[in-house]
Image (spheres, rainbow, N blue to C red):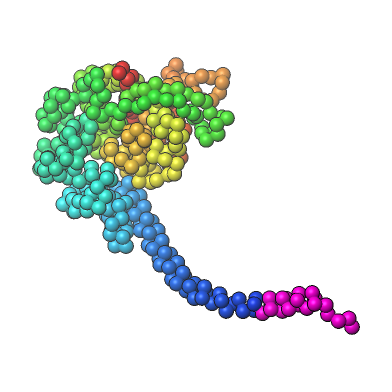
Amino acid sequence: MKPISYLSFIILTFLFFGCSIEQKLPAKTTAKETIIPNQKTTTKEEKIAQQKSKKTQNLSLKGEREYRRKNYKSAEKFFDKALSIDPENLHALTGIGWTLYDSRQFKKALVFFKKANNRYPKDNSAKRGLAYLFYRIGKLSEAEKLLGKLDRNKWPELTQIDLEKNSSVGEMDLNVKKTLFKKKGVSKYQGLGNKGSDLIIPQKSPGSNMVLITGGVFYFSTNKRFLKKKKRKKAKVKSFLMDKFEVTNSQYAMFVKSSGYPEPPFWDSEQFSGAHLPVVGVSWIEAKAFCSWVKKRLPTEIEWSYVAQGGQRQRIYPWGMKLKQRNAIFGLDLITGGPKAVGRRPQGASIHGVEDLAGNVWEWVQEKYNTGNKKIYSTKKERIEFRVLKGGSWANGSWALKNFNRTGDLANRKLPVYGFRCAKNNTN
């Protein structure tokens, strides 16, 4: 056997002590291992918090679904359960507030709206609910602080409250036909505490219920290829004005009395006749006539889409890229359901502040309905052309809420899911 050289001895020594060092390493890591239990405890706390948050959210969403279906007792129970887990949850606070408001439990609703507004002073839903309640109980100065000017065009809910106050004690039938039409439309409207300046009279400056939309260039599409740049076309939009809300029954009532156009066919039904509800059962022809009467016009499909998509932001919904049930009125029962008061979903507004673009009622726009067949520009039936409707309605599923979706119908068709809003050229 050959003797070990000095160099080999050094290498063997290093390897031996190196192994010894590696064997001792676990002892050094014990300090780190002692930290792990604390980390696991934190994770458990986070998981519990997440589970509570998820449970609260699910209960509140169930309450929202029941509220939209007008199952107010059931909705109140779900919101109560959500608040028992998280007493400061905004969705549940405003949800139970509107549930109590619409079931006419105003004193109880006031408690929740006060709490929501104190905790979340920037939330528009809490602010509006509290303001409407202040208006109901006669605290006009406090209502005005929250809403600004008490303009019935800007806040249609106030007209409904006025109608209820002026109705006989115990009278629950508050439909427009039986209240606004006891006197001539405009006279009755002024009799509800409105001044002549509050009427829908065209003005050179933007009306209180109109929003200035700054023009620009955006990608426009009318199908699922919305997000594929190669399949879309660029469209240029000039600055214009658009109604903040859909046209309401109280506004349309004045037009009927002034113009001689027929009353909408659904005013005899309580679920479609509230003064603060969007008018339904209006044909494209009548919608166009109303807009002309107030010196406005129907928006084009490109204008409507530009506002709903947020211009170049290419939003799928007016409020963003994901569906949020609280932001729109949709998916209600065809028999018992109906539209909700305009302006009840401020969270669903576009970046420009235009509300109720998704859900509530389908909205007529100017264009003829193109079937997609290049040989047929517009669908016709007995020489009556189809026109485009946008936005989905209270009776449709969530698919209809997407900005690129559209439908079309005969220009003289009147359905309880068809409404409209007006637009106007910007002359400044």
Mark yes or no: residue 361 visible: no
Range shown magenta = 1-20
- At horizontal 19% and vertical 53% (from top left) the residue drawn is 111
Classify 56 as above or below 8.
Answer: above
In the displayed structure image, the side of residue 164 where residue 397 appears, left or right: right
Image quarter where the C terminus lies is: top left
Q: Nearer the viewer, residue 211 or 36?
A: 36
Q: Nearer the viewer, residue 54 or 253?
A: 54
In the displayed structure image, the side of residue 121 where residue 60 appears, left or right: right
Q: Residue 223's x, y, as percent?
A: 51, 32
Q: Quadrant of residue 88?
A: bottom left
User: Which residue ends up furthest to the bottom in the rendered image?
Assistant: 1
- Confirm whether the magenta stretch covers residue 275: no
Q: Residue 367's x, y, as percent?
A: 43, 21
In the displayed structure image, the side of residue 16 where residue 66 appears, left or right: left
Q: Quadrant of residue 50?
A: bottom left
In the displayed structure image, the side of residue 107 where residue 42 appears, left or right: right
Q: Residue 142's x, y, as percent?
A: 14, 43
Count of numbered circles on the image: 0
- At horizontal 26% and vertical 29% (from top left) the residue drawn is 209
- At horizontal 42% and vertical 44% (from top left) the residue drawn is 323
Image quarter where the N terminus lies is: bottom right
Classify 90 as above or below 341.
Answer: below
- SS majority, magenta: helix
- At horizontal 40% and vertical 58% (from top left) the residue drawn is 54
- Confirm whether the magenta stretch covers residue 13: yes
Mark yes or no: residue 151 visible: yes
